[in-house]
Amino acid sequence: MSDYNVIWRRYGLKDNPYFVNPLSNIGDLPLSLFIGRQEERRKLGNIIRLGEARCIVVGEPGVGKTTLVNFVRQEASKSQFFTPSREIEINRPMDGNEFIILTIGAIHDEIKLRKIQIEPELMQKLDALYELTQYGELTPEIANLSQLNRGKLMELFREVVGKIVHPRFKGVILHYDNLDNMDSPNDILELLSDIRDFLLTTKVTFIFVGDNFLPPIVYVRPRISQIFVNTPVEVKSLSYEDILKILNQRLEFMKLSGDVTVIPPHTEEAVKKLFELHDGNLREILNSLTECINETAASNSPILITEDILCDILSRKVNENYINKLSPEDKKILKIMLNKGSHITPTELSKISGKSIQNISSKYLQKLARMGAVRFKEADGRNRYYEVTPVIKWWKLQRSEREKQESKKKAQEQVEKILNRSLKDFI
Ligand SMILES: Nc1ncnc2c1ncn2[C@@H]1O[C@H](COP(=O)(O)OP(=O)(O)O)[C@@H](O)[C@H]1O
Ligand SMILES: [Mg+2]
């Protein structure tokens, strides 16, 4: 058994209930753990019912986009839509041919998985193309061999879609994930321009998932915006109540065996604190909880992560890994960014801190970005916005000595109250 599992066994759990991977209908994190999102499900459902469309799903990293689209696709597949189980990763620059080959590869996998019968001759063509994608990463050189010209690839795609849909399915749904991992908006724009005609294939719904970079790219060029549905599906943070439900359900799911009692590793107050700190971002909340449990690994008994313990562990972590390595000047800049609460431009930083713009840009921001304390968020015209990384938010959890004393006193009072009560009962 790995050390890791030993930690969770103390709580009566098989494994980490604070996992951060998306739910999916393949793998071991099932979509039965899905909670909430009525509004987004309705919006996406309406788009899919059009039978053929192109749309974007956008939101901050970690709010639940991939999981949402996986869930909606699973629902749709129950009502006769065909969709590859695995989302198609578009997380690096690629050209149109690679994009189309990856798409056909995903459809091929699903045909095999579901043992769908299609004409042998067509299946042979698919198998041959599929082989190309089997040797590690598909290289642009292979994708652009002259035998694989665009016309032929599109023809093959249309033929496959046609053959799958009639007479079995209402349509095909394709889910392209993680477009935000492409470094430059230009790469996405070029790709979309390149595959515009491909995206017009009938009976196919194309769903692109990315962060808030995506709408300005998609909706700026008429040639592209014209083919997308008018508004993006925006995915916001889940409510606090939904997040509590998710955590409770995960504890039940990770329970060791039927008769073991699960000891919840966290209190609701601790979750509330993290919910406020991370603006409801589920992945950041989960990461913070895992971090706390990892810190208690040396203990033999299960430790309950209360609000106090959470504050102590996470503020110590951020101090050790980041803050203590900074000069007073660096700290001042970082504090301004932290207190701003959202993104900030170098100009604004320069005004508040009294430092020159040059120093802000070429000295402070660079150093802070290099150590992972801040990151570039987005550009808007000539403005460039920066923000602190999620771990830096733990700095806000630092409590003064007085606060620590006060909470210690409160805890003591509680214990005394309970002791008094039970002693009374005893006498
Ligand atoms: N509606 C939901 N119900 C249950 N768990 C969810 C839900 N949405 C997201 N999660 C969980 O939150 C984490 C982040 O979700 P993910 O879909 O990966 O976010 P994103 O794609 O926006 O980065 C994952 O661990 C996922 O399992
Ligand atoms: Mg995702």
Image (tube, rainbow, N blue to C red):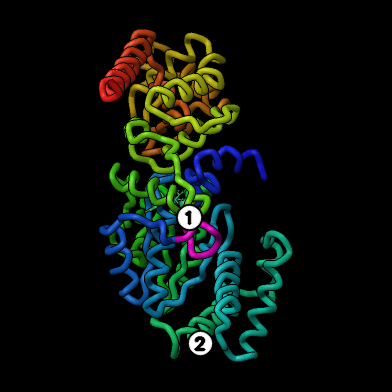
Instruction: Report whether residue 171 is seen.
Output: yes
Residue 90 pos. (x, y %): 54, 57
Secondary structure, magenta segment, majority class: loop
* Rendered residue at 45%/20% (across/down): 312
**Of residues 110 and 124, which is closer to you in this image?**
110
* Rendered residue at 58%/82% (across/down): 115
Residue 152 pos. (x, y %): 60, 79
- Above/below status of 316 relative to 270: above
Query: Quick one: SS at disc 2?
Result: helix
Q: Of the numbered discs in the image, which one, if any, rests on residue 296? A: none
**221 in the magenta segment:** no
Tell me the amino acid under the disc marked 2.
Lys
Label 1 near ligand 1 (CB < 8 Å): no
- Above/below status of 113 relative to 301: below
**Of residues 45 and 216, which is closer to you in this image?**
45
Instruction: State which region is magenta.
Output: 22-30
| Rendered-image quadrant of the N terminus | top right
**28 in the magenta segment:** yes
Q: Earlier in the sequence, mark 2 or mark 1?
A: 2
- Above/below status of 267 relative to 120: above
Query: Quick one: SS at disc 1?
Result: loop
Kindly report the distance in space between the C-alpha atoms of the residues bearing marks 2 and 1.
46 Å
Q: Are marks 2 and 1 in contact (CB under 8 Å)?
A: no
Total numbered circles: 2
**Of residues 409 and 241, which is closer to you in this image?**
409
Instruction: Report whether residue 216 is seen.
Output: no
Residue 123 pos. (x, y %): 63, 85
* Rendered residue at 31%/68% (across/down): 45
Tell me the amino acid under the disc marked 1.
Gly
Determine which residue is flagged by label 2.
Answer: 163
Determine which residue is flagged by label 1.
Answer: 258
* Rendered residue at 40%/80% (across/down): 80
